[in-house]
Image (tube, grey):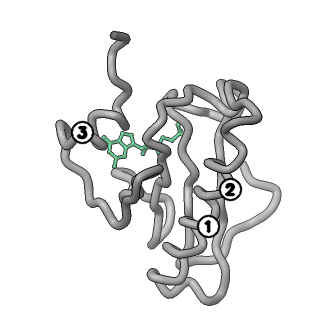
Amino acid sequence: MPDKTLFEKIIDREIPADIVYEDAQCIAFRDINPQAPTHVLVVPRKPIPTLDDLTEEDAPLVGHLFLVAQRIAADEGLTGGYRTVFNCKADAQQTVFHIHLHVLGGRSFSWPPG
Ligand code: 5GP
């Protein structure tokens, strides 16, 4: 068995996290280093390393992650809007190689991103 990713350890409750939602396909918890008043990571249970590793069979799963993001935004009262981000590999500063959808809100964001 390959080593577990950091996020698999959170899923398996080996590392604590502030979990805000979970279901059969994914888990969502607050980022340890929040970049906005709301900063939640939506993580599939399936440990896909990067967006480049997605296959056609993962399409429903990725759609589900966005629906969970929508639900979290509603739960957090982000009526003014929010930002969702998948960082992919080095140029985007991906640091945890288990895909995760960042859900950021509670302040206004600039564009283009840094
Ligand atoms: P990435 O840079 O890969 O897109 O995002 C990884 C995110 O995971 C970062 O925002 C980072 O703060 C968060 N993170 C790293 N380690 C932990 C941890 O142990 N617990 C939680 N809750 N978040 C973490």
User: Mark 3: few, some, or many residues within 10 Å (few <14, many ≥20)?
Assistant: few
Q: Which residue is denoted by mark 2 in the rendering?
A: 63
Q: On residue 12, which mark appears?
A: 3
Alpha carbon distance from label 3 to label 1: 23 Å
Where disc 3 sits, the SS reads loop
Q: Position of residue 44 (x, y in %)?
A: 49, 44
Q: Position of residue 60 (x, y in %)?
A: 68, 50
- Residue ID at (37%, 37%): 7
Q: Which residue is denoted by mark 1 in the rendering?
A: 67
Q: Amino acid at mark 1?
A: Leu
| Left or right side of 16 for 31 | right
User: Mark 1: few, some, or many residues within 10 Å (few <14, many ≥20)?
Assistant: few
Quadrant position of ligand 1: top left
Q: Is residue 43 above or below residue 71?
A: above
State the image quarter where residue 14 is shown.
top left
Q: Amino acid at mark 2?
A: Gly
- Residue ID at (65%, 40%): 87
Q: Is residue 86 above or below residue 40?
A: above
State the image quarter where residue 2 is shown.
top left
